[in-house]
Amino acid sequence: MPLIPPTELAPDFTLSDINGQPFALSAQRGHIVVLVLNRGFA
């Protein structure tokens, strides 16, 4: 996957958070977002 230039928006995606609730990147627009993607321990 190519890197996204700093001037370009990241593509939208939806994942489940630690509580099983959906997390959509687009819902965070206008906020600072730091993503930590962890494979888990299973």
Image (cartoon, rainbow, N blue to C red):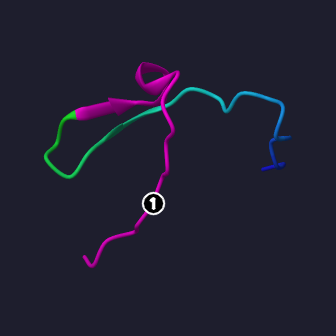
Q: Residue furthest bottom?
A: 41
Q: Position of residue 31 (x, y in %)?
A: 48, 30
Quarter of the picture holding the C terminus: bottom left
- Which residue is painted at 56% across and 26% down in the image? 12
Q: Is 26 part of what is drawn in magenta?
A: yes
Q: Residue furthest left?
A: 19
Please state if 29 lies on the left or on the right of 18 as rendered: right
Query: 16 or 25: nearer the eye?
Result: 25
Q: Is residue 11 above or below residue 27?
A: below
Q: Residues within 10 Å of mark 1 (few under 14, many from 20)?
A: few
- Which residue is painted at 82% across and 40% down in the image? 6
Residue that badge 1 annotates: 36
Q: Position of residue 7 (x, y in %)?
A: 84, 32
Please state if 7 lies on the left or on the right of 13 as rendered: right
Q: Residue furthest front?
A: 31
Q: Is residue 15 above or below residue 29?
A: below
- Which residue is painted at 51% across and 22% down in the image? 29
Q: Is residue 27 above or below residue 7?
A: above
Disc 1 residue type? Val
Magenta highlight range: 22-42
- Which residue is painted at 41% across and 20% down in the image? 27
Counting the numbered discs, the total is 1
Q: Is 9 part of what is drawn in magenta?
A: no
Q: Position of residue 25 (x, y in %)?
A: 47, 30
Classified by dominant secondary structure, the portion drawn in magenta counts as loop
Secondary element under disc 1, as helix, strand or loop, is loop
Q: Position of residue 5 (x, y in %)?
A: 86, 41
